[in-house]
Image (cartoon, helix red, strand yellow):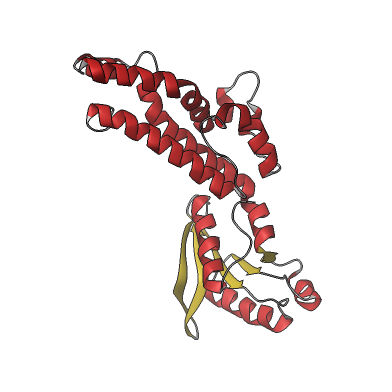
């Protein structure tokens, strides 16, 4: 899925949960102290959806236990959730909840999820709000070097030395196709009037996505990875390296 599945401790788990919530657009922090009628309480992760009408808030507790979580822990978490005024509560666990705990949260706004289930719940949002736009936007910066009609680029090109011009043209030939492909990730669905590219659809699996991208991307990027975050990092590293090659010729990012 998005991240690796195993964590060294609950602290590692809560940081991964927080990062994912930040990726999908929430304001999220770890180890937050919140005032309650009985005094201050610290929650593992506290998040607010600022784009929602009522600023929906989340409290998250992370348990990296090798056993399922008992009902008593859920009772205590319910109290914390209610006293902090949170709208949604999440218990993110390693092994899930005991049957009594699962029954207790049924038909409530408390979710008991393993980290794998948590990733699946938010994967579509993560793909649309984080993976695609960050890859596409990074590629667009390089596309300003590779597109054929960027007037500013060609004006800057004219004052380059012959050696620099040759180097620039070689880089354009090397990167034009792959950068144009990656830039499409930032394009909105309604941009396409006919066929929507299949590689932009929310993938069912990592192997499916790598298969869709393989022919175009693999000559440039080693996409042998075990999760989507690693794939994302590999693509951004490639794009950043390509931009740096162009920047070196112009003494900085030419389009700033």
239 vs 82, left or right, is: left
Q: Nearer the viewer, residue 70 or 78?
A: 70
Q: Nearer the viewer, residue 211 or 117?
A: 211
> In the figure, 114 relative to 246: above or below?
below
Q: Position of residue 55 (x, y in %)?
A: 50, 57
104 vs 29, left or right, is: right
- Residue 10, quarter of the rendered image: bottom right
> In the figure, 230 relative to 140: above or below?
below
Please say whether residue 256 is visible from this viewpoint.
no
159 vs 233, left or right, is: left
- Residue 82, quarter of the rendered image: bottom right
Q: Position of residue 111 (x, y in %)?
A: 68, 65
Residue sitting at x 66%, y 29%? 198
Q: Position of residue 130 (x, y in %)?
A: 51, 44
Residue sitting at x 22%, y 13%? 158
Residue sitting at x 55%, y 24%? 191
> In the figure, 165 relative to 182: above or below?
above
Residue sitting at x 60%, y 43%? 224
């Amino acid at each position: 899925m998005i991240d690796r599945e195993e964590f060294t401790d609950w602290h590692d788990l809560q940081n991964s949960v927080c990062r994912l919530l930040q990726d999908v657009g929430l304001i999220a922090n770890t180890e937050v102290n919140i005032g309650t009628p009985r005094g201050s309480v610290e929650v593992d992760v506290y998040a607010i959806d600022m784009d929602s009408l009522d600023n929906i808030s989340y409290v998250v507790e992370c348990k990296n236990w090798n056993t399922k979580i008992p009902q008593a822990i859920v009772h205590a978490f319910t109290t914390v959730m209610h006293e902090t005024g949170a709208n949604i509560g999440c218990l993110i666990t390693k092994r899930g909840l005991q049957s009594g705990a699962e029954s207790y949260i049924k038909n409530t706004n408390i979710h008991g999820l393993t980290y794998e289930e948590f990733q699946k719940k938010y994967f579509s949002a993560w793909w649309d709000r984080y993976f695609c736009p960050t890859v596409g936007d990074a590629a667009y910066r390089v596309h300003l070097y590779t597109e054929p009609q960027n007037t500013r680029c060609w004006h800057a090109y004219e004052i380059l030395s012959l050696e620099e011009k040759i180097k620039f043209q070689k880089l354009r030939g090397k990167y034009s196709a792959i950068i144009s492909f990656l830039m499409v990730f930032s394009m909105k669905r309604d941009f396409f009037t006919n066929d929507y590219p299949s590689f932009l659809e929310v993938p069912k699996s990592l192997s499916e996505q790598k298969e869709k991208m393989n022919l175009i991307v693999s000559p440039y990027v080693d996409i042998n990875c075990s999760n989507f975050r690693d794939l994302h990092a590999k693509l951004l590293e490639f794009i950043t390296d390509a931009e740096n090659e162009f920047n070196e010729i112009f003494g900085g990012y030419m389009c700033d």
